[in-house]
Image (spheres, rainbow, N blue to C red):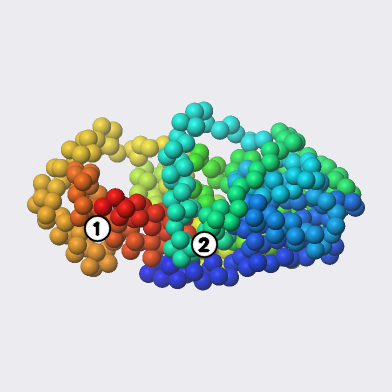
Amino acid sequence: MLRPDGEQLLKEFSATAYPCQVTEIIPGVVYHVMGYGISNASFIIGKNTVILIDTLDCDYRAEALKAIIAEHTEKPVKTIIYTHGHPDHLGGAGVFSDSNPEIIAFAPSKPVLGRIDALQDVLNQRGIRQFGYELSDEEAISEGIGVREGIVQGKGRRAFLPPTTVYSEEKIIRDIDGIALELTAAPGETDDQILIWLPVQKVLCCGDNYYGCWPNLYPIRGSQYRDISAWVDTLDKLIAYQANYLLPGHTRPIIGANDVTDTLTNFRDAIDYVLTETLRCMNQGMTMDEVAEAVKLPEKWANLPYLGEFYGTVAWSVRGIYAGYVGWFDGNPTRLNPLPIRTRAEKTLALMGGIESVLSAISQALDNEEAQWALELADIIITADSTNKLALKFKAQGLISLARQEQSANGRHYYLACAKELLADL
């Protein structure tokens, strides 16, 4: 989301949303660890062993987690539960291999698209841009939902351990070392996401199906469609537990039954509103661009501290929903067989008085702080002539300008990463 103060808002959010903090949820039993990695972890002390939920993002961070556990108990970690398969939640698992833990995960509710490995290079490139892996700490600020990953800062490596127990059932009830647990498939941000319910303690671990900012309903790095309707259904499940404590995979825990219910209800209703309004606008025949302009989050949700657009954004969510439901074609027959992109660019430049005229307009747009317009003009030139250094330089300047306005960490990173790539080639 672009705002004049976007950079400052991201800095302020990042400074307060996930401080290093160990919260004793249930004295002597349940603990929540935040701020020691991009993701959170929780641990539960049983009769003789420890149950660990997620493991932080790398071995360096997990060593700190292991020390925190040791401050509260000498019992070994004999069970690890993965809330889902994202690497920032699994990367520290290897640190606990010495106790030979059972590692529990759920199979995805939907299969991964066939031949996805054929996209490995471009998905890696887009992931590097989104997460800001090649940016400095000052440039990146944060990951939006947490501090930067340890591997980005040269602190450790990812130390994965594969699951030893993989469930395909909807719900599993376990008693692990005297701790009653319900593990339930809960597709949302990922199709393998689960929720973990401790019925005796009324503690609910929700993974990444809730965290304290606008969720990544569509990741700009690229992914399969995230079924937003299923995500809303999962949030209904979370609300129905009437938990006293909500332990998310990122940002602060929610403590108190009323706060848990209010937070989850607002989070659920805001997402449902965006989905419903997007589909309504689509059904009226609006194009993707028109729908993205039309659907705005009402202030009653937009102003809540846990729905700020510091990670995902409403506009990207709308576009993701549009593409997920009807694909690339927006209904305008002009787009069925468009001109080759270079031909269109050359004809457009001719109508605009040629390259020099457009370069002058780009310079003027940058001076007028119209960075998006400058980028769109620059792209016309670059499409016609990818070697035009001034157009490439102007594009980099426009990207840097938008990065300063972008309050989403993902968007900021992507703008800056692409700007650095352009400047490096000049």
Residue identifier under label 2: 142
Residue 135 at what x, y percent from top left? Answer: 44, 58
Mark 2 vs 1, N-terminal side: 2
Q: CA distance from mark 2 to mark 1?
A: 26 Å
Farthest residue, direction top: 114
The front one of 86 and 408 is: 86
Rendered image quadrant of residue 148: bottom right
From the viewer's perspective, is residue 125 above or below residue 251? above
Q: Do the residues under discs 2 and 1 have CB atoms within 8 angstroms?
A: no
Quadrant (top left/top right/bottom left/bottom right) for the N terminus: bottom left
Residue 414 at what x, y percent from top left? Answer: 41, 53
Amino acid type of the residue tagged 1 in the rendering: Phe
Q: Is residue 177 left or right of residue 249?
A: right
Q: Is residue 285 left or right of residue 25?
A: left
Q: Tell me, for residue 329, which label it has, or none.
A: none
Element on which disc 2 rests: loop
Element on which disc 1 rests: helix
Q: Is residue 254 left or right of residue 128?
A: right
Residue 46 at what x, y percent from top left? Answer: 86, 53
Residue identifier under label 1: 394
Amino acid type of the residue tagged 2 in the rendering: Ser
User: Is residue 295 among what the camera can see?
Assistant: no
Residue density around tag 1, few if under 14, some if 14–19, many if 20 or more, within 10 Å: many
The residue under the point 75% across, 36% down is 165
The residue under the point 88% across, 47% down is 177
User: Is residue 419 among what the camera can see?
Assistant: yes
From the viewer's perspective, is residue 96 above or below residue 308? above
The residue under the point 56% across, 33% down is 112
The residue under the point 11% across, 56% down is 357
The front one of 280 and 303 is: 303
Number of marks in picture: 2
Residue 424 at what x, y percent from top left? Answer: 32, 53
